[in-house]
Amino acid sequence: MKILHTADWHLGKKLDHFSRLEEQKKVMNEICTIADVQNADVVIVAGDLFDTFNPPVEAVDLLYKTLKKLTNNGKRPVIAIAGNHDSPDRIDAPNPLARACGILFVGNPDVTIPTVTIENGFEITQSENGFLEIQLPQYEFPIRIITTPYANEMRLKTYLGAENKEGQLNQLLQDSWAALADKYCDTKGVNILTTHLYMLKRGGEILEEPEGEKPLRIGNADIVYTDCIPHQIQYTALGHLHRFQNVGGHPNPVVYSSSPLCYSFAEAGQDKKVVLIEAQPNEVVKFTDIPLQSGRVLHRKRFENTDEAVIWLLENPYCLVELTLVSDTFFASQDLKRIHESHDGIIFIIPIVTKDGNAEQHTPKVNLDQNIQGLFKDYFVSKHKQEPNEELLDLFNEIIGSQAKND
């Protein structure tokens, strides 16, 4: 059985002011193509379908079109859980209609998907809060999936039925998952866990959460350790961290598939992927990470010469850039105009002025007998340790002239 694992789509997300919607359309189409080419039997989307609780209409439209395409006309079940960026009620809302198409949404942790047979497709044979079993017509054995969408600690404890709300989240999750696994996950089917949590190997390296993300880890109190995962689980499909990685700490793979695009400059240089799992009952799964090619590459570039910056920008049109410009003087507006006109994907320009000016550390004497232009120059030097350029002086004189006319 082939299972495609993807996560953290963040549909509708912008990079500062820059819309990523066109890139997201391309990468969603690429994921659909991979599912078809690889003959995936099941697709799991492990949370953060949207970037906000109230996504734009275009993002909602893209989600439903993508999921419907992934179902292959109801023949391929698509299980999509809510992440910390998603409104769980919004994810659950279209459930009856979505199920008829082969899309199984899990927004809240207490959702029970009813047993049902999809016309010309698969059958949900067993179901309980946080669990479903699916029988595909092309296999003699079923797939069992334990689902835990994101919820904050108090809500998770409530949904898990914890009498002692002060109890440790790790123990509560371990007990809940173990109860479901012991009840349903024998060796005669494929057993999967999918969740949107910050998970870590006990004693392992602290993994950085994505830049600009809503953090799930506050100190170390909210870390969920991978030794909570039941031994019956053959593969854990995670969402939240945007870098592809096998976390470890369990006999079987515990994998963050990565986001489909680089969503911050801290992710520049990361390879974005989906994961294809090949699973048989009671056997170690094989998984392969498949790189995604769509989307604009993110670059952090540094130049000490405007001409060099413009040349590089013209040679690399399909990317998004954080541009650091180093100079010993302030940049003239015509230089910045040249840079902006050479590329449509400049997100940030960071100017760095290196000239130290007069290094002597003493309070300068001010000649009050000089004209206002001279006073402005002295002030500018004391403030910025360098002479103002001609453009700044012209602007200052224009302001002074305008003020004199008003007086």
Image (cartoon, grey):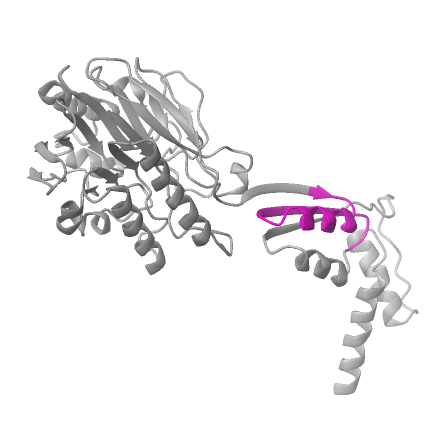
Comparing 351 with 92, the one in front is 92
Comparing 129 with 395, the one in front is 129
Q: Position of residue 264 (x, y in %)?
A: 50, 43
Image quadrant containing the N terminus = top left
369 relative position to 163: left or right = right
77 relative position to 402: left or right = left
User: Could you tell me which residue is drawn at 32 percent across and 37 percent down?
Assistant: 36
Image quadrant containing the C terminus = bottom right
Highlighted range, magenta = 302-330
Please tell me in which quadrant of the rendered image residue 265 appears. Answer: top right
Please determine whether, in this image, residue 25 is positioned above or below residue 396: above
311 falls in the magenta region? yes
Q: Position of residue 120 (x, y in %)?
A: 12, 41
User: Could you tell me which residue is drawn at 15 percent across and 36 percent down?
Assistant: 159
Comparing 110 with 220, the one in front is 110
405 relative position to 245: left or right = right
**Is residue 407 something one can see in this rendering?**
no
76 falls in the magenta region? no
